Amino acid sequence: MAKTKTKFVCQECGYESPKWMGKCPGCNNWNSLVEEREVKGVKAMSHGGSGPARSARAQKIMDLEGKDQPRINTEFMELNRVLGGGLVPGSLNLVGGDPGIGKSTLLLQVSHQIARQGHKVLYISGEESTRQIKLRADRLNIRDDNLYVLAETNVEFIEEQIRDLSPSLVIVDSIQTVFHPEIVSAPGSVAQVRESTSHFMRISKGQGISIVIVGHVTKQGSIAGPRLLEHMVDAVLYFEGERHHAYRILRSVKNRFGSTNEIGIFEMGEKGLREVINPSELFLSERSKGAAGSTVVASMEGTRPVLVELQALITPTSYGTPRRMATGVDHNRIALLMAVLEKRVGLLLQNQDAYVNVAGGVRLDEPAIDLAIAVSIASSFRDKPTRHHDVVIGEVGLTGEVRGVSRIEQRVTEARKLGFKRAIIPAKNMHGWDVPDGIEIVGVQTVEDALHEAIG
Ligand code: TYD
Ligand code: MG
């Protein structure tokens, strides 16, 4: 049996100490010492004596087996897409989010949906008792022969149970509650979170089990145990949303098996989470007709076009420096677009406050939304409404030129599907694709052209 002991290692300079210290004597940084587990005798055990370690042999890439393993269908199309086509067997995934956002609900529903296909699923909770889980399961109408529940926080006991049961999927809710008995620091500390995660990594890779770890997000917005979880796992998904809104967005920020541009949209209801298949309808549902400062854009969220309303409110600054506030879009982008409108179109915006908002609580970060922001700002400033059936697409350059965007056909087709009659698009995107019937396209060269078309 390997003998273990812990030591404290400075994360900045690597200084080692047998006990914890607030300040590292090596590099004088504060609070940089973190407990680590030292495993003695591993070398001798695994390599059978002295001499160089025997390691894997280099192989020709042609000879490697690269069969694509079938993925596990979670039965949530939104989640499957964010994962890149379903859950990869033997992968380690992290689902992060604020407490109370719905992580446990989502994963219990996913467990049910996977268990009913005949896969064995083990749901481990360190936060709730089995009775609480049962109550939630009843509320969600979940009863499955293949779904097992375990209220345990010691990773060694958890490993034993996983070995006995050999499930296809394990949910660990949450990483902040589990602990390794050989680490003295409290559950949720950096050392515990790291040690437990590497434990789960060994289990998932060694036994080919998919593991989903839940991680609560700290106030600074990182998963506790600063980012250290993110590079250990295969995929990191964040579950976001306003607690007061029913909508929840699942976003991937890292994915070894798919793209990180995808988002999945869910709605929290009485009976748990429901997927939102057509988000454009949702984002446009509360739009008011004929209001100045509102423009609709077709933005690409990964492979899917989403129609979103961009709102701007421009009011004279009462005193001091003008305010520039943005929710859902980059604040610097607003400043840049206002400067372009001022210099190239001649709108006097320097003594105006600007508030720009993406309706519905989504975050957009592609340049194709520039033109719609500019139109909204000008529309609010001049107090002239945009046309209700227009959608505006285009990137804006510093000279006021409108630049081409990718996937114009998909964007315009989505707008057409939702009943939009006209699309104002970059002149460069006018040719080379099939315009769907029932929508008119107008090409514009400059922001000024676009304003002329949109608000006259
Ligand atoms: P939960 O999944 O416990 O959040 P997390 O695990 O991220 O901390 O979700 C808790 C919230 O969801 C709670 O405020 C109640 C609400 N909820 C519903 O609105 N409907 C439901 O069917 C369920 C199960 C929860
Ligand atoms: Mg929970």
Image: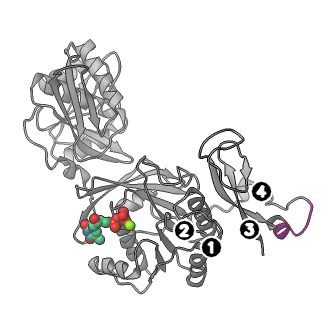
Say which amino acid is labelled 2: Pro
Q: Which residue is mark 2?
A: 89
Q: CA distance from mark 3 to mark 4?
A: 35 Å
Q: CA distance from mark 2 to mark 1?
A: 10 Å
Which circle's residue, 3 or 4, is located before the other in the chain?
3
Which residue is drawn at the image coordinates 33% and 15% (left, top)?
399
Q: Is residue 329 magenta?
A: no
Which residue is drawn at the image coordinates 22% and 55% (left, top)?
245
In this view, the mark in front (4 or 1) = 1
Q: Is mark 2 within 8 Å of ligand 1?
A: no
Say which amino acid is labelled 3: Thr
Q: Residue 22 or 133: which is nearer the viewer?
A: 22
Q: Residues within 10 Å of mark 3 (few under 14, many from 20)?
A: few
Q: Which residue is mark 4?
A: 59
* Whether label 2 touches label 4, CB < 8 Å: no
Q: Is residue 46 magenta?
A: yes
* Quadrant the C terminus occupies: top left
